[in-house]
Amino acid sequence: MTAAAALIAVAPDDAEIPEEISGDHASSSAGRRKTPATEGRILISKVSIGFKDRKGRHTHAVEDIDIAIEPGEFAALIGPSGCGKSTLLNAVAGFVSPVAGSILVDSVRITKPLPSIGTVFQNFALFPWLTAVGNVEFALKQFRLPRDERRQRALLALAEVGLAEHAEKYPGQLSGGMKQRVAIARTLVFGPSVLLMDEPFGALDAQTRLSMQGLLLDLWEKRRSSVLFVTHDVDEALILADVVYVMSAAPGRITRRIVVDTPRPRAVDRLDQAFLNRRAEIIGLLQQQPSPL
């Protein structure tokens, strides 16, 4: 499934309107709410995912994955290229079905995309013919809200990510960092309790990437959605996450769960010894894996 198709499939036609964006809550800011402690629990149990190649041969992408993410927790997933990180993320989003095991979000088995789960892609997945506010507003059309209310909420979401003055610009008029801000606003506008991010900052320059990491942490502190964040960058994982899951080469398995208890805020220019030890541990685990061809 392409990123654009995934965006269209965010929720089925019979999806209920999340309370945070229903008409009774029109005055709330862009669906913002601090997720209650009971929302956003992700349980991935004994999950294996496989595909058939062109010759009909079955290939395992990930095998026997067990991950538990508590409400409001920020988890990072890191591993070598081709280990199945994005495949696993797509399964949590409801875009891919496991061949074994189960994925539950707040005790609901994931078999299709749900409005309580938001996904941010690396390639932005913006519609070039829509303005920034139009792209964010598009995410709300499935909830049958009045046009004026959709517009108001989209503008509030853009303001939350610092793009209020760029609402009427088209994607072609925006920088890479601005495009990703629009993508994040579009995902957060309906107040998901789970946020899935597939290397969202991988295509950005180093300075913009640091800025976007800071923005993401600010938004997470306000909303406390549960986050599953895929990255190739060890420092990024350790700066952002409460816990880091390290995956093996394909077929991907979880080889280590590392708790990051370094106090926030964190930065690469002021790291304690425990942080450095965790970095060395993760790099060592990744170096044990065979290099991709």
Image (cartoon, rainbow, N blue to C red):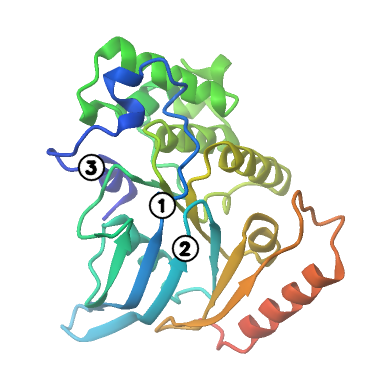
Q: Which badge, 3 or 1, is on the more N-terminal residue?
A: 3
Pointer 1 local density, CA inside 10 Å: few below 14, some 14–19, many at least 20: many
Q: Is residue 293 visible?
A: no
Q: Residue furthest left?
A: 14
Q: Which is in the foreground here, disc 3 or disc 1? A: 1
Image coordinates for residue 201, horizontal then vertical, percent = 58, 49
Q: Is residue 262 visible?
A: yes
Residue type pointed to by label 1: Gly
Q: Residue at x 62, y 61 (%)?
A: 242
- In the picture of the structure, the residue carrying the numbered disc 1 is 40
Quadrant hosting residue 239: bottom right
Q: Secondary structure at mark 3?
A: loop
Pointer 3 local density, CA inside 10 Å: few below 14, some 14–19, many at least 20: many
Image coordinates for residue 268, horizontal then vertical, percent = 80, 57
Image coordinates for residue 174, horizontal then vertical, percent = 54, 28
Image coordinates for residue 74, horizontal then vertical, percent = 55, 56
Q: CA distance from mark 2 to mark 3?
A: 22 Å
Residue type pointed to by label 3: Ala
Tag on residue 186? none
Q: CA distance from mark 2 to mark 1?
A: 8 Å
Along the line of sight, which residue is nearer the eye, 146 or 252? 146
- In the picture of the structure, the residue carrying the numbered disc 3 is 11
Residue 211 is left or right of residue 95, and the answer is: right
